[in-house]
């Protein structure tokens, strides 16, 4: 059967063709090479799933390598966060985590090699002069006045750069390629620049650092990478990638291939812009549940396999586009619907007193942990004279025939419990409803008497045993589908001021006092929520984040209209 008939993506076709031709001696060795200058986001998840997934599928290896060539923006915090995220998604890298900085000695020697081959020179123009001299897409660049230096002078100057004898910005090392090349990446790109800053891995050993383009392909070659995958914006860099591989004494010759990045509607994935949101205090750190960072999604209660399923759904193509965020939301809902334990929580509590129940009586009702999976077992629900229902589930006067919840003189079933009838409404001096006095029918547990049918079912919690909790309702952070596509306004202009609603005090069933962090539960008729361990510790009471709201069709199908 051909690869086309088996419906595999273009990258898998490349790999299978290479395997058939024994191009890399039957090896498949990929890498995930993040720069440790921020936290990973949903776009990185696509690359992680691709590189690690291909290694798994073809019995190969995948390296985790940090492209740490810029000490100005990189931190050890980001390194550790990236490791956590890769593990969280369910992947394990080959061997130890690797670093570009581990190859600095080799890269320096290869820079010297290029100088010796008269393919690199030290340029003492400043950054603005270099930028202007590179020309434009329609005009060729101009050669540097330092381009004609002989190799002995360049070698001596480069050694002085390494020794710290130049100030920052006073000199750079450039490749000598072609200042009239139609691809501007090939117009004498910068190989090394001076950065007199301590590095999170190498300390103060270096004061010059290689540029990403010079380091990246050589790292692949050192590690024996067979297939180097990048997003489409790096396609323009591929000729330079190949030029370095061709002109340096590298141990092997990897190939670079490009695929479409993940662009998600109502979302910003630029690390620079995400950092701006963090630095300006618009969000609560890199793990804010409104951010598309993997740590934010984890804190929000999104299961890692829902993200992997989403990445599989969108596939790998060469065509760039915008994926509707509803596809991600669909994957999260479908996953949680199947596996999230059920629980009851009342977000806006209204006290109900069961007047025909003794004050000291307590019953233990039973409810399934999951209605479609008996294997998940049952949970016990205390039931006493006083309970809470949601204020939205009661009106004094029934508004229409479709109203299926409680009203004065009407009946409703408490989920997993009894039928109650509202007999009296108590109000404060301002006319606000404070309490409902109801009676319950002891013969209605789990069934309706034959002489009457009660259609309405509402959720509730026991007043005595339930726990006070803060509930955080998260919505999309941006109100615009493409917040960073407007030249006339900054992306922060489109911040959704309703992206976070805090409710306190809500009440949650007693079983949720032992809720596990990052594990989502379905609050029946409300949505999916998880315990926010960070905020719970800060505030001293339970805090739950809404992972995602219930789908309307699912809500109506399983619980009735609300």
Image: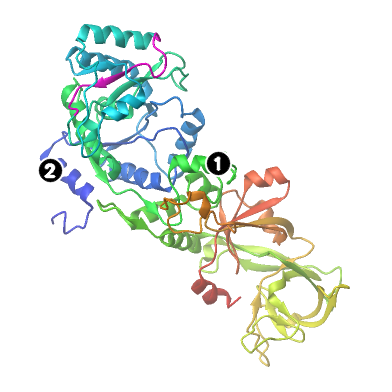
The percent position of residue 114, horizontal first and vertical second, equals 21, 17
Left or right, 511 with respect to 23, comes to right
Q: Using the image, tell me which numbered label, if any, was put on residue 278.
A: 1
Classify the position of the C terminus by image quarter. Answer: bottom right
Q: Residue furthest right?
A: 429
Majority secondary structure in the magenta region: loop
The answer to whether 413 is drawn above or below residue 68 in the figure is below
- Of the numbered discs 2 and 1, the one sitting upstream in the chain is 2
- Residue 62 on the magenta span: no
* Residue at the spot 73% in from the left edge and 83% down from the top edge: 407
| Marking on residue 98 | none
The magenta-colored residue range is 164-179
- Name the one closer to the observer, 379 or 315: 315
Q: CA distance from mark 2 to mark 1?
A: 48 Å
Q: Which residue is mark 2?
A: 20
Residue 354 locus on image (x, y percent): 81, 75
Q: Give SS at disc 1.
A: helix
Q: Give whichever of 77, 14 is nearer the camera.
A: 77
Question: Marks 2 and 1: which is nearer the front?
Answer: 1
Vertical side of 383 occupied by 232: above or below: above
Quarter of the image with the N terminus is bottom left
> Going 27% across and 38% down the picture, which residue do you hit?
60
């Amino acid at each position: 059967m051909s690869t086309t008939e088996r419906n595999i993506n273009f990258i898998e076709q490349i790999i299978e063709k290479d395997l058939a031709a024994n191009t890399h001696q039957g090896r498949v060795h990929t890498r995930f090479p993040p720069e440790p200058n921020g936290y990973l986001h949903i776009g990185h998840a696509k690359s992680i799933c691709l590189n690690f997934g291909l290694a798994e599928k073809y019995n190969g290896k995948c390296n985790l390598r940090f492209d740490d060539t810029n000490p100005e923006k990189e931190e050890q915090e980001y390194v550790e966060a990236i490791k956590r995220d890769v593990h969280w998604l369910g992947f394990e890298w080959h061997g130890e985590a690797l670093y570009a900085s581990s190859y600095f000695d080799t890269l320096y020697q290869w820079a010297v090699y290029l100088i010796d081959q008269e393919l690199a020179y030290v340029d003492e123009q400043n950054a603005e002069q270099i930028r202007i001299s590179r020309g434009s897409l329609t005009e060729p660049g101009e050669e540097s006045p330092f381009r004609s230096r002989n190799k002995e002078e360049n070698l001596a100057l480069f050694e002085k750069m390494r020794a710290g004898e130049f100030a920052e910005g006073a000199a750079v090392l450039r490749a000598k390629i072609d200042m009239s090349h139609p691809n501007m990446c090939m117009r004498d790109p910068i190989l090394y620049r001076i950065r007199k800053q301590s590095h999170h891995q190498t300390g103060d050993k270096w004061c010059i650092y290689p540029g990403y383009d010079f380091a990246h392909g050589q790292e692949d070659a050192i590690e024996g990478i067979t297939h180097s995958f990048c997003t489409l914006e790096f396609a323009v860099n591929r000729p330079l990638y190949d030029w370095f591989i061709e002109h340096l004494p590298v141990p092997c010759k990897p190939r670079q291939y490009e695929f479409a990045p993940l662009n998600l509607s109502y979302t910003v994935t630029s690390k620079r812009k995400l950092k701006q949101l963090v630095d300006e205090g618009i969000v609560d750190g890199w793990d804010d549940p409104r951010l598309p960072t993997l740590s934010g999604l984890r804190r929000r209660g999104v299961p890692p396999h829902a993200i992997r399923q989403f990445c599989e759904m969108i596939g790998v193509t060469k065509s760039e586009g915008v994926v509707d965020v509803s596809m991600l939301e669909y994957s999260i809902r479908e996953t949680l619907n199947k596996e999230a334990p059920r629980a009851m929580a009342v977000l806006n509590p209204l006290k109900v007193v069961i007047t025909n129940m003794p004050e000291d009586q307590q019953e233990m009702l039973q409810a399934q942990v999951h209605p479609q999976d008996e294997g998940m077992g049952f949970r016990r629900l205390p039931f006493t004279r006083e309970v809470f229902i949601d204020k939205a589930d009661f009106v004094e006067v029934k508004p229409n025939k479709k109203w299926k919840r409680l009203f004065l003189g009407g009946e409703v079933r408490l989920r997993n419990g009894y039928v109650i009838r509202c007999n009296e409404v108590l109000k404060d001096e301002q006319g606000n409803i404070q309490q409902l006095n109801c009676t319950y029918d002891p013969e209605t547990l789990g069934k309706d008497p034959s002489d009457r049918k009660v259609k309405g079912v509402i959720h509730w919690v026991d007043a005595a045993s339930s726990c006070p909790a803060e509930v955080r309702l998260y919505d999309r952070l941006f109100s615009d589908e493409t917040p960073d596509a407007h030249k006339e306004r900054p992306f922060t202009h489109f911040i959704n001021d309703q992206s976070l609603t805090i409710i306190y005090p809500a009440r949650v069933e007693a079983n949720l006092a032992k809720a596990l962090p990052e594990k989502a539960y379905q609050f029946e008729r409300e949505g999916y929520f998880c315990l926010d361990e960070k905020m719970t510790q800060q505030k001293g009471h339970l805090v739950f984040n809404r992972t995602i709201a219930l789908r309307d069709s699912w809500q109506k199908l399983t619980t009735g209209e609300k």
